[in-house]
Every structure is written in structure tokens, then in C-alpha cells.
């Protein structure tokens, strides 16, 4: 794997104010892609300035906010007000909370809503919420009128550090998660870290799982930060939480800038823990595990297999387990049906030529893709996770 260039916290966009060049202190990174680039921004209370940021991007026409019933009153309405304060008309559609909203049926209902409102290609779709609103909103933006402008306003931890960045959009099928979708890049990602202060501890924990994953696969020093500041991060202390979120966003942004469509063997590293994790979600009908919780269990499965294959030590496995447990994340999936998990893994999008591609660690901060993992080891590991 080629070495990664972390754009990190030192990267700042520069904007002109007369003759004065000023940094954007909230900018975490910029994603570069085949069609251009877009900012990835995180700040405390950022939603209040969203209208100004839309004006800067030239998104001054009608907007359509897609959010869920839990997020609407907390943040969806504030997004609407921020846009309207800059004379940008904004309509809202409210979807049921949860993974089951990523369906053809709900997408069709939103298409009809947009048609009734006479949405145009020059208008903007805005996803406000977690990964579900992001995936569904992006899918709608990519397909309605063959493509509309799209902006991500993530309000969950997992969406901020992972799902909102990189342009993966999708809906689910009964057989597996995210089987129907595309790569469609937003015009910008704007995360208000203050929104995390209203989340429950379980929602915070599952979001931190994705950021912890970034550390284990690509940045050993980030793992150190999580080990040293667990209490402050779980309490969402503004300064440390914002800095760690920006750092994790920068890692994700840099990876997807190098491998936009997951064709170069770089972006796949972000799927550490996801092969088992996605299968856990689908096999339990998306009702038992949050996404980050499934990833946490999947990380333990991948680490266990890698250790048995001689890629790294038992100490690494236990270090990962201890950190995940400190963030109240599951490291096993007791009682889930083994056959359902194995079936779910057979539909994994990383399967190539009939072989599963497993992301594994060689050491903390360095990962590799392996296609030679014995099926008997996979089955043994899954059985151990659920027993």
C-alpha cells in the first residue's frame, strides 16, 4: 500500500477578505476527486453559519432537506433556518429513523415529493443526520434528474468521521446492505460537533468505533490519543472532540482522494471490520447492532484471524479489545446465527473472483489486504464470536 499523506489539522482553506488572506479554522481536509474537489469541515456550532457556506459554494437556489424523525426538531429545522436567513428556500422531508429507511419504496416516495415540488437539477439535496440520511439522500441526489447538487450535514459521530466523506451512496436489499448504489460526491461536508452533545452514550460509542478503526489501520498515534483521552472524548469535550474528529475526517478524506472508486487497493483498507460487521447487521435485520458495533465485532474477528495467520501478535489483539471495550463497544456477538452471518459475508461487496478480500493488520497503524484466509478459519472465528 502506498504511504498516505495526512492533510491533518494543519491544512486550512484560504479565503480572500479584501487584501487579507484568512484561514478557515474549521476545515479538516479537502477531498479531491475526478470531478473536482470539496471541503470537509468540522466546528462547534457550525450549523448557524451554514447559509454563508452555501453562498460561498454558489448553492443559492432551492434546497431539499432529507432527515429523520429524531433529527428534524434538533437540527433539521436549524439547517432550514440557517439557509432561509440567506434567502435560500428550504423544504424538508422526514423519514423514519433506522437502516430500514434505505429502501426502494422510500426512495420512490421521495422522488414523488421532489416531483410535486418541481425540483430542478440546479437545486440542492441536503442530508441532515447519520449514515442513513446520508446514504439515502446521496442516492436520491445521484439519480433524480440524473444528478442534483448534494451536501452532507452529518449529526452522528459515525457519519462525521466516516460515512459522510467519499461519496458512497446506496440503499439496501433484503439480502444485504448497500447492494444498490453508486459513487456520487457531495459539494461539501459540514459537521457541527456540538450536535454530538445530545447523543446517547451508545450512539457516541458506535461512532468512535469508526475513528478508532482509522487509527488501527493507518495512524498508530491516533490510537494513542484514544487510549489517553477516552473519558474526554466520551464526554464530547469541545476542543479535544473537535480536533480528533477533524483528524479522523482528514484520514478518510486523504484515502478517498487517492482511491475514489476503490479500484487501487487503498480505499478498501477503510473496510477493516466491515466484512463481518455488515453481515452481523443484515443477519439481524438491522435491529440488534448499530453499524459501529458491528464493525467493532468485525475488527475483533479480523484481528483474531490475522494473529492465527502470523501477521501480528496476541498483544495487538488484546490492545484492540481493551480499547474497544473502554468505549463500551461489543467485541463478540453472542447468540447470532452462524449460518446467517456466513451467508451475509458471501454477498460482501469486497468479494472478487469468488474470493473474499480481508483487511487485516500487520501492526498498529499498518494494514494489508489478504485473499488467502482459509474458509475453515473464517467459520471457526465466527463461531467463536457468537458462542
Image: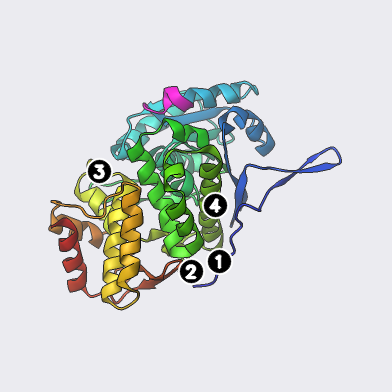
Q: Residue at x 36, y 44 (%)?
A: 205
Q: Is residue 71 magenta?
A: yes
Q: In the rendered structure, which segment of residues is drawn in magenta?
A: 69-75
Dot 2 corresponds to which residue?
264
Q: Counting other residues with Cα less than 10 Å from the Cα at mark 2, is it few (<14), some (14-19), or many (20 or more)?
A: few
* Of the image marks 3 and 1, the number of the one nearer the N terminus: 1
Dot 3 corresponds to which residue?
286
- Pointer 4 and pointer 2: residues touching (CB < 8 Å)? no
Q: CA distance from mark 1 to mark 2?
A: 13 Å
- Which of the two discs, 3 and 4, sits closer to the camera? 4
Can residue 294 be seen from the camera position used here? Answer: yes
Can residue 178 be seen from the camera position used here? Answer: no
Circle 2 — which element? loop
- Which of the two discs, 4 and 2, sits closer to the camera? 4
Tell me residue 322's x, y (percent). Answer: 32, 57
Circle 1 — which element? loop
Circle 4 — which element? helix
Q: Is residue 266 magenta?
A: no
Q: Residue at x 69, y 47 (%)?
A: 13
- Which of the two discs, 3 and 2, sits closer to the camera? 3
- Pointer 3 and pointer 2: residues touching (CB < 8 Å)? no
Dot 4 corresponds to which residue?
247
- Pointer 3 and pointer 1: residues touching (CB < 8 Å)? no
Circle 3 — which element? loop
Q: CA distance from mark 3 to mark 2?
A: 30 Å
Front residue of 331 and 271: 331
Q: Residue at x 35, y 48 (%)?
A: 327
Dot 1 corresponds to which residue?
4
Amino acid at each position: 500500500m502506498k504511504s498516505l499523506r495526512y492533510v491533518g489539522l494543519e491544512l486550512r482553506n484560504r479565503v480572500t477578505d479584501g487584501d487579507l488572506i484568512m484561514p478557515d479554522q474549521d476545515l479538516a481536509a479537502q477531498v479531491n476527486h475526478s470531478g473536482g474537489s470539496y471541503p470537509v469541515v468540522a466546528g462547534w456550532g457550525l450549523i448557524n453559519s451554514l447559509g454563508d457556506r452555501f453562498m460561498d459554494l454558489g448553492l443559492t437556489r432551492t434546497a431539499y432537506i432529507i432527515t429523520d424523525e429524531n433529527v428534524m426538531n434538533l437540527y433539521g429545522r436549524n439547517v432550514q433556518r440557517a439557509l432561509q436567513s440567506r434567502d435560500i428556500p428550504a423544504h424538508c422531508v422526514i423519514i423514519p429513523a433506522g437502516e430500514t429507511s434505505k429502501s426502494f419504496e422510500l426512495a420512490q416516495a421521495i422522488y414523488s415529493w421532489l416531483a410535486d415540488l418541481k425540483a430542478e437539477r440546479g437545486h440542492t439535496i441536503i442530508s441532515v443526520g447519520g449514515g442513513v440520511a446520508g446514504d439515502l439522500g446521496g442516492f436520491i441526489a445521484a439519480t433524480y434528474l440524473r444528478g442534483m447538487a448534494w451536501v452532507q450535514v452529518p449529526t452522528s459521530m459515525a457519519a462525521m468521521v466516516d460515512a459522510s466523506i467519499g461519496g458512497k451512496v446506496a440503499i439496501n436489499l433484503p439480502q444485504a446492505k448497500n447492494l444498490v448504489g453508486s459513487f456520487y460526491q457531495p459539494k461539501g461536508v459540514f459537521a457541527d460537533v456540538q450536535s454530538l452533545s445530545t447523543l446517547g452514550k451508545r450512539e457516541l460509542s458506535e461512532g468512535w468505533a469508526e475513528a478508532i478503526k482509522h487509527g488501527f489501520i493507518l495512524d498508530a498515534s491516533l490510537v494513542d490519543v484514544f487510549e489517553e483521552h477516552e473519558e474526554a472524548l466520551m464526554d464530547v469535550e469541545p476542543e479535544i472532540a473537535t480536533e480528533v474528529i477533524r483528524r479522523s475526517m482528514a484520514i478518510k478524506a486523504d484515502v478517498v482522494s487517492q482511491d475514489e472508486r476503490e479500484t487501487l487497493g487503498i480505499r478498501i483498507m477503510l473496510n477493516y471490520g466491515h466484512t463481518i460487521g455488515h453481515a452481523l447487521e443484515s443477519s439481524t435485520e438491522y435491529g440488534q447492532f448499530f453499524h459501529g458495533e458491528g464493525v467493532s465485532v468485525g475488527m475483533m474477528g479480523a484481528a483474531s484471524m490475522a494473529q492465527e495467520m502470523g501477521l501480528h501478535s496476541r498483544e495487538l489483539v488484546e490492545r484492540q479489545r481493551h480499547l474497544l471495550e473502554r468505549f463500551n463497544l461489543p467485541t463478540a456477538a453472542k447468540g447470532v446465527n452462524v449460518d446467517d452471518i456466513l451467508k451475509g459475508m458471501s454477498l460482501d461487496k469486497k468479494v472478487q473472483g469468488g474470493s473474499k478480500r480481508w483487511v487485516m493488520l500487520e501492526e498498529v497503524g499498518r494494514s494489508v489486504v489478504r485473499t488467502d484466509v482459509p474458509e475453515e478459519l473464517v467459520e471457526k472465528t465466527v463461531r467463536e464470536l457468537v458462542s
